[in-house]
């Protein structure tokens, strides 16, 4: 096990480091980013007034809208001559969110991702197959630089071209694979469809993130590939992947790189802090970034945090798996539910393949949700390839019952034949919103 000293620091040591860095960051944004300076001045405070970590709460929360309003470079704290990279996240509407990095930011990011890969079990000299997309998305380059920094032989495959991915895995014999869980599942199934057993490949560890996934999805991936699958979390606004990483020893929560990012959890409606262990919206403040420091950023991600010791020996605060995004939460007949919770229950059914989509539709004035599930090839064979077979009625009743018991929701179910649900090419599309179309004449 590779443990970095700071990952096992005592609380006092960690918090005094955080405070020192927070004060530096506050001073940087006050002097260099008009948006933040206005916040200080409106509250009649000065960076020197920040004397404890709690004092951070004197400052307001920052939202995605604030970043969009300052598109493209208005939130940067350094001049263009100091920037060496930008990334952007696409977002569903309007302009993308642009983030920038100095060389020091890139080095720091590489360090934390190297730490994350080492935590999962990556080792210098062995091969890492990186199937996260390269480009404006932070996944590809984020894992790439971390892997190189750790001294791993980095294969920058990016997404797409399944056949090439499979050849490279067979020939280069990576021990670590990185990608979104839905894409790697797609890859594993493609390998199976070629009559090969993905469990016999050289892979030992999967570093999966960039989208919500359930413990059942973990079981599926670990089983099909015979690997240990660990969750990696991050977002471009905070840095990219590496904000938090799950250790294989516990597989129970992700260690936050607390020496670089300060976490809070708030109730997304009242904006008040919630207690440890309670789910709420994650809020992050960067402590060491130069180009794009961020103060109290509302991530939109729902999770809880826990403090205390971990079997791996690390003392850093852990966040739970992300349940989903505030804006992906569905309210079905008054019950709140996230797609990843449905996934957890759906994947228990042997008749189904691990693929699903939720279609939001309009029936008159009412919003309705249809859950599309796909039967496994074995079950399909038992239907003699006829999706209209009477046995499907029993399956629908069963799926309805599982959703009702597991998530307390009743919804319409549509059963699809194998491969009918589109496969992931990156972040999986779990929710398809057809409501706009429905209201068109
Ligand atoms: O997805 C960064 C990343 C790349 C993380 C590779 C992990 C691996 P964005 O494109 O800015 O950055 O999207 C960030 O993705 O706010 C979450 O909603 C979601 N997300 C990221 N990691 C996880 C995860 C990258 N492990 C948004 N579990 C975040 C659940 C995740 N959701």
Image (cartoon, rainbow, N blue to C red):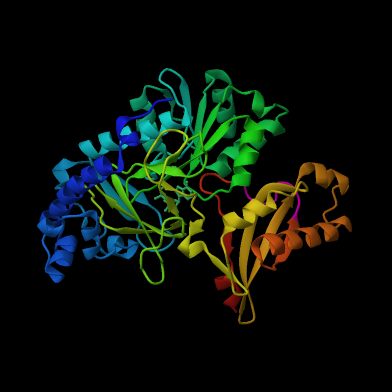
Residue at point 43%, 22% (across, down): 123
Magenta span contains residue 43:
no
Q: Which of 394/83 is in front?
A: 394
Residue located at (37% from left, 37% from top): 142
Quadrant where the N terminus lies?
Answer: top left
Quadrant position of residue 394:
bottom right
Query: Is 435 situated above or below 105?
Result: below
Q: Position of residue 242 (x, y in %)?
A: 38, 40
The C terminus lies in which quarter of the figure? bottom right
Is 421 inside the magenta-drawn segment? yes
Q: What is the chief secondary structure element of the magenta stretch?
A: loop
Give 268 or 74, whichever is nearer the viewer. Answer: 268
> Can residue 289 be spotted in the picture?
no
Horizontal side of residue 53 vs 392, given as left or right: left
Q: Which residues are magenta?
A: 416-423
Q: Quadrant of residue 333?
A: bottom right
């Amino acid at each position: 096990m590779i443990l970095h000293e700071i990952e096992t620091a005592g609380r006092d040591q960690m918090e005094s480091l955080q405070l020192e860095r927070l004060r530096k960051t506050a001073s940087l944004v006050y002097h260099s980013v008009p948006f933040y300076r206005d916040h200080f001045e409106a509250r009649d405070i000065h960076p020197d007034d920040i004397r404890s970590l709690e004092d951070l709460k004197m400052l307001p929360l920052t939202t995605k809208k604030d970043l969009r309003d300052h598109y493209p470079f208005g939130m940067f704290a350094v001049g263009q001559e100091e920037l060496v990279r930008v990334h952007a996240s696409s977002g569903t509407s309007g302009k993308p969110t642009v983030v920038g990095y100095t060389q020091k930011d890139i080095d720091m990011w590489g360090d934390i991702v190297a730490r994350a890969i080492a935590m999962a079990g990556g080792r210098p000299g062995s091969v890492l197959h990186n199937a996260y997309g390269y480009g404006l998305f932070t996944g590809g380059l984020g894992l790439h630089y971390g892997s190189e920094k750790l001294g791993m032989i980095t294969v920058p495959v990016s997404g797409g071209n399944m056949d090439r991915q499979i050849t490279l895995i067979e020939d280069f014999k990576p021990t670590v694979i990185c990608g979104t869980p839905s894409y790697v599942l797609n890859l594993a199934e493609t390998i199976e469809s070629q009559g090969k057993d993905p469990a016999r490949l050289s892979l030992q560890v999967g570093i999966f993130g960039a989208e919500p996934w359930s413990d059942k999805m973990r079981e599926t991936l670990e089983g099909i590939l015979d690997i240990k699958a660990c969750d990696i979390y991050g977002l471009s606004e905070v840095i990219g992947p590496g904000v938090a990483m799950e250790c294989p020893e516990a597989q129970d929560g992700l260690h936050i790189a607390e020496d670089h990012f300060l976490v809070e959890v708030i109730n997304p409606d009242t904006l008040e802090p919630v207690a440890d262990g309670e789910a709420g919206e994650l809020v992050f403040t960067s402590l060491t970034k130069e180009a794009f420091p961020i103060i109290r950023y509302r991530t939109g991600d729902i999770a809880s945090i826990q403090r205390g010791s971990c079997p791996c020996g690390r003392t850093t605060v852990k966040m739970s798996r992300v349940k989903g995004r505030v804006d992906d939460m569905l309210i079905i007949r008054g019950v709140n539910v996230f797609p990843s919770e449905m996934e957890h229950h759906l994947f228990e059914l042997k008749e189904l393949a691990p693929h699903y989509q939720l279609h939001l539709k309009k029936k008159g004035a009412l919003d309705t949700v249809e859950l599309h599930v796909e039967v496994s090839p074995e079950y399909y064979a038992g239907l003699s390839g006829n999706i209209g077979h009477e046995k499907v009625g029993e399956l629908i009743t069963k799926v309805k019952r599982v959703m009702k018991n597991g998530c307390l929701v009743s919804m319409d179910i549509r059963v699809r034949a194998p491969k009918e649900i589109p496969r992931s090419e990156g972040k999986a599309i779990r929710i398809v919103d057809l409501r706009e179309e429905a209201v068109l004449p």
